Amino acid sequence: MKTIPKKQVKQGKKTKKSPLIQPVEFIYGLIILAYIFVPTFTPNWMSLDTNTPKFFMTASLNLVVFMYFLGSGYFRKNPSFYTWFFTNPVGMAYTALLAVTLLSFTQAVNHLESVLQFTKVFTVFASAFNIAMILMHDLRYMRLIIIVMAGLLAFDSISVFADINKFIEGEIKAITDIKTVYSNKNILASAIFVKLPFALFLLVFEKKWLKSLGWLTFTMGVAATFFMATRAFYLGLSVLSVAFIGYHLAIYLRKKDNSMAVLAGAYIASLVLAYGLFTYTQTNLYPQAKKNRHTEGVIQQMATLKDPESASSLRLDAWRWSLQLIKEKPLLGVGTGNWKVEILKLENQKNPGFIYLYKTHNDFIEITTETGIFGGLLFLSIFFLVVWNFLKRFIRKKDEADTIGKYMFIAAGGVAFYSVDAMFNFPADRPEITALFAFFVATAIAAALHDKNIENSEQGTVVSVKPISAVWIPLSAAGIIIMAISTWILYLNFQSSKTQRIVYQEIMGGKLKEPSEKILAGFPLIPDVSVWGESIATLKARYLINEEKHQEAIDILRYDFSSPWDARREFFTAMAYNNMKEYDSAMHYSELAYQLKPNYFRNVQLLASLYEIKKEDNKASELYNEFLDRNKSESQAWLFASNVYIKNEEYEKASELIEEAIQYHKWDTLIKKQQRFLNHKLSIEPHLPKYNQAVELYQNKKYSQAITLLNDFLEKVSDHSGAFQIRSFCFYYLKDYPKSIADANRALEIGPPNASLINLRGVCKLDLKDKEGACKDFAKAKEMGNDSGKTNYDRFCVEKE
């Protein structure tokens, strides 16, 4: 390779009558803008996941741009650009990561998911390649990128401020509903945070109004980050701010350059102003009725990371499980795209439902899990090499503000901010964020080339250019083929996502309405796992079972090999067989589902009912007891388990179970009702013959004998209001008015309101010369509609003229 003259690198070839902007330069500018706007603003086009059309459109853009390069002879004219991308350290690490990702297919359980994930990885790689080709032609295109990105940062920030105002006014219910043009709050927060380096570039390297614009957009972006209530970015902003301020203070101490101290001061002022605006709004303007984690101050939000019930604990589980998978397959991982498949063998032993952590929330860990330790190190090395290229200039005491140095700054700062998102989220699956990664990597590669050319020019080094057609022609052909296949696969993924949207909305709505024929026809070959981690086969089976096409559902599920650990295949198969009354087969598949996912209550309930049908009640009881040992919070399990004992008249065991359930479900009305039922069975029913005999004696006016039996009965059943009521009447007829009143009070205390008993109490009080107390009881009985109470009140309590 020979040195590319500086003029050629920056401006290309010109004719004497060359216009100010040549057509090719204009096309390159449009391509750059396309790589900014296509991944960001492509609509969801009725798909469930907005990422699917964005990846498809980005892949299409890659294919068109690469074909343009081939057709225009770009690679023939600039062979060193093509070579440099694959031979400089950053490009080599990225290419090696792509190769290791492909090798990880050998470890995959689900190869279709590997193919789909590889197309996404390759699409980002191809974007970085195409952008790098333009930046190697002229690095000044990066200035266009920076200005447009800073503009988008301002647009995103203003959109957040507008929605925060709507939240304050009550037009938006929660901070989590703020998403502007993105699919959710987290992506919006990521898009703002990872664009902050572009505003920093303007602040550090531009002059006059652009420098002021950089400070303003950075302040707006930081304020918007505070408002989005994303704890990961609070932490990342703190760490990166220390690095930024420390770097500029180090330059100030080394060069005694006051401008560096001014920059550090401007940065600090921006942080303080943004924090002040957020804190004032959060404290004084946020609706108090909507107080939650997202409306707290920064310090209070960070404190919630210690909460074991928060989302951070779920991420820690995912990271811990991932490390276990890395230990099992350290070299090539579990296969790209297969994290969400393999993790289920660990997650299902804890997770009681089918809402899965289908992403690790840490790209560094996920890529290492899927591609092995070498893949993880290669991914990490991309960040390290980009930052190192920039730091080398500082170590060698080169001018940080030179053309190459400032573009190395944006590349290093960009991957640093991106790494925060990659550490706590999954930007690799978000095209609008991976587009930024592609720009940062492409800038690092292009800046390294220009730096090398300048260094060679200064040293007078000249290396001859060798024809590389024998290399780049087959590579280009392979590139075209892979890009075309990737575009087709991502198109199928997009089409599947549109059907997934229909299914998801109907599942969440609680009713499947669409005909199964439409759903089955709406799913192409790829993918075979939905966005939320459910196999496409079980989605189809849901609709077939809903239409009582049970055998068709079983046939589809039989050939579902998307995951050996997702128990939905076994569960839906068991349901289908159960509906067909083929109980042996239903039991077999339900037992398999239980082994895979022991904490899923619906399957436990199904399996227990099958045991009962097969007259194996002991197995049903053991199953419920095993489940309850692990899951105290499932109230229905306590009820069903006690019902098994009740069915076999084992009331003592049922009562013990319900008494334990009360400890965990004090306010559950069904459990309390079961407790009352069992109390009646155990404490009252054995003694009811004596109570019934006492009632018969009372009716035959044998009051003393009735009282004797009632005394004996109440020794056994101390809270029977009916017994106290009957004994109260017995004492009245025996003229023992104090005891009659005492029993009436006790009956009314533990039993329902009783107007007749209140009137009786009033009669007793009247006989005891307590007219005032008697009249109060008569009045109350009268209000309750008791005729005797009305008569007594009118007779004894109304003053006659």
Image (tube, grey):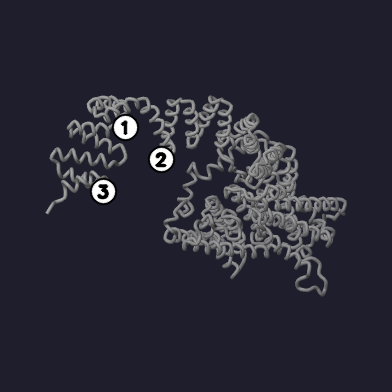
Compared with 585, 15 (above or below) is below
Binning the other alpha carbons within 10 Å of mark 2 as few (below 14), some (14 to 19) or many (20 upward) gives few
Judged from the image, the secondary structure of the residue bearing numbered disc 2 is loop
Q: Position of residue 470 (x, y in %)?
A: 88, 51
Residue 513 as seen in the image, left or right of residue 284: right
Query: Which one is nearer the viewer's eye here, 619 or 433?
Result: 619
Instruction: Give the residue pinned by disc 3.
Output: 783
Q: Residue sitting at 32 percent across and 40 percent down?
A: 752
Q: Residues within 10 Å of mark 3 (few under 14, many from 20)?
A: few
Quadrant of residue 206 within the rendered picture: bottom right
**Does label 3 or label 2 sit earlier along the sequence?**
2
Q: Is residue 741 left or right of residue 497?
A: left
Image location of residue 160, percent across then percent down:
54, 61
Q: Earlier in the sequence, mark 3 or mark 1?
A: 1
Q: Which of marks 2 and 1 is in front?
A: 1
* Mark nearer the N terminus (2 vs 1): 2
Q: Could you give the CA–CA distance between mark 3 and mark 2, rounded to whole angstroms?
A: 33 Å
Q: Element at badge 3?
A: helix
In the picture of the structure, the residue carrying the numbered disc 1 is 720
Q: Which mark is residue 667?
A: 2
Residue 19 on image: x %, y %? 78, 74
Q: Where does the image place residue 245, in percent across and percent down from the top left?
A: 54, 56
Q: How many labels does the image show?
A: 3
Quadrant location of the C terminus?
A: bottom left
Reply above or below: 237 against 768. below
Disc nearest the viewer among 3 and 1: 3
Q: Residue furthest left?
A: 801
